[in-house]
Amino acid sequence: MKKVLITGGAGFLGSHLCDKFIDEGYHVIAMDNLLTGSLDNIDHLFRLKNFEYYHHDVSKFVHIPGDLDYILHFASPASPVDYLEMPIQTLKVGSLGTHNLLGLAKEKNARLLIASTSEVYGDPLIHPQNEEYWGNVNPIGPRGVYDEAKRFQEAITMAYHNYHGLETRIVRIFNTYGPRMRVQDGRALPNFFSQAIRGEKITIYGDGSQTRSFCYVSDLVEGIYKLLLSDYHLPVNIGNPVEITIKEVAEEVLALVNNPRAEISYQDLPKDDPKKRQPDIARAKQILNWSPKVGRREGMIKTLEYFKAVL
């Protein structure tokens, strides 16, 4: 039985990855310090013999006894609310944490996949965004702590690949949604769902014309799994290329929730908030034979059911 370590394993994406690797017959070790993760997300796995949980901050030295085949580094605050409140921890988990895990991968001769992000493209000057684009990032702006942590993470991972010959993979994740997102996450869909269900005003920042592309979590996990097992070491975009404005998303949520008390309100756009976000997934299609399968309405209904259950 192959063994995989998933950092951030109690988080939204990390917990779904734990499920995937359990289903595929792996021995899974989830590691999390619960800064933004929750044991509720992996509670159903603790009864399994092929699942372990380590409470640990990967910014400190990481030790795993025995053999290890794969490492997936998904530990990091990931929403603007989180990384604006925890800027130092965000920078440390992207730099020190990645360094520690690269060292562990080298020691164990394991393959390491890092979770990078579409935020490495910043507020992009090309559209859609492909992997050859170097980005338009403000390194000293409020979002720089996350953007630059991820850009450094890519750089040090490539350095270990090129200098030490380490087996590495880099996934650039675009907006993802689904069950287990935190109610207080602060990103568009969790905000919209929780506000609409409670009958509060749905908050749109700016005029709502900025665009995003939303990928359902099961599609994303499948793409990550295929990338890990591929022979490709350069960055790969994984996301849904169907682009939509934030205002249109809010209107879709309002129609789905159908709470007459909920309505849209507008607030100022945060500094350096990207105006456009759409992945070019030609590389994922060609190399991984991957493209998203779950339509937005189907995914939104599943996500709504989850938010109704937890609120």
Image: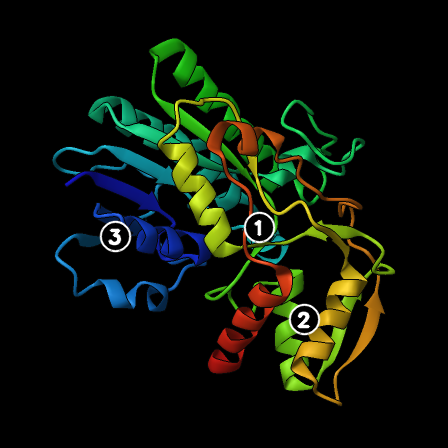
Task: Please indicate, yes or no, whether residue 183 appears anywhere in the rendered image.
Answer: no
User: Nearest the camera: 205 or 113?
Assistant: 113
Residue identifier under label 3? 22
How far apart are labels 3 and 2 at the CA level? Answer: 32 Å
Task: Please indicate, yes or no, whether residue 203 appears anywhere in the rendered image.
Answer: yes
Secondary structure beneath label 1: helix
**Label 2 with label 1: CB-CB less than 8 Å:** no
208 up-or-down from 107: above or below? below
Q: Residues within 10 Å of mark 1 (few under 14, many from 20)?
A: many
How far apart are labels 3 and 1 at the CA level? Answer: 30 Å
How far apart are labels 2 and 1 at the CA level? Answer: 20 Å
Residue identifier under label 1? 83
> Which numbered disc, 3 or 1, marks the residue closer to the eye?
3
Sequence-first disc among 3 and 2 = 3
User: Nearest the camera: 273 or 111?
Assistant: 111
Residue identifier under label 2? 192
What's under tag 2, amino acid-wise?
Phe
Going 23% across and 32% down the picture, which residue do you hit? Answer: 69
Name the image quarter holding residue 128.
Answer: top right
- Give the tally of numbered discs: 3
**Label 3 with label 1: CB-CB less than 8 Å:** no
What's under tag 3, amino acid-wise?
Ile
Secondary structure beneath label 3: helix
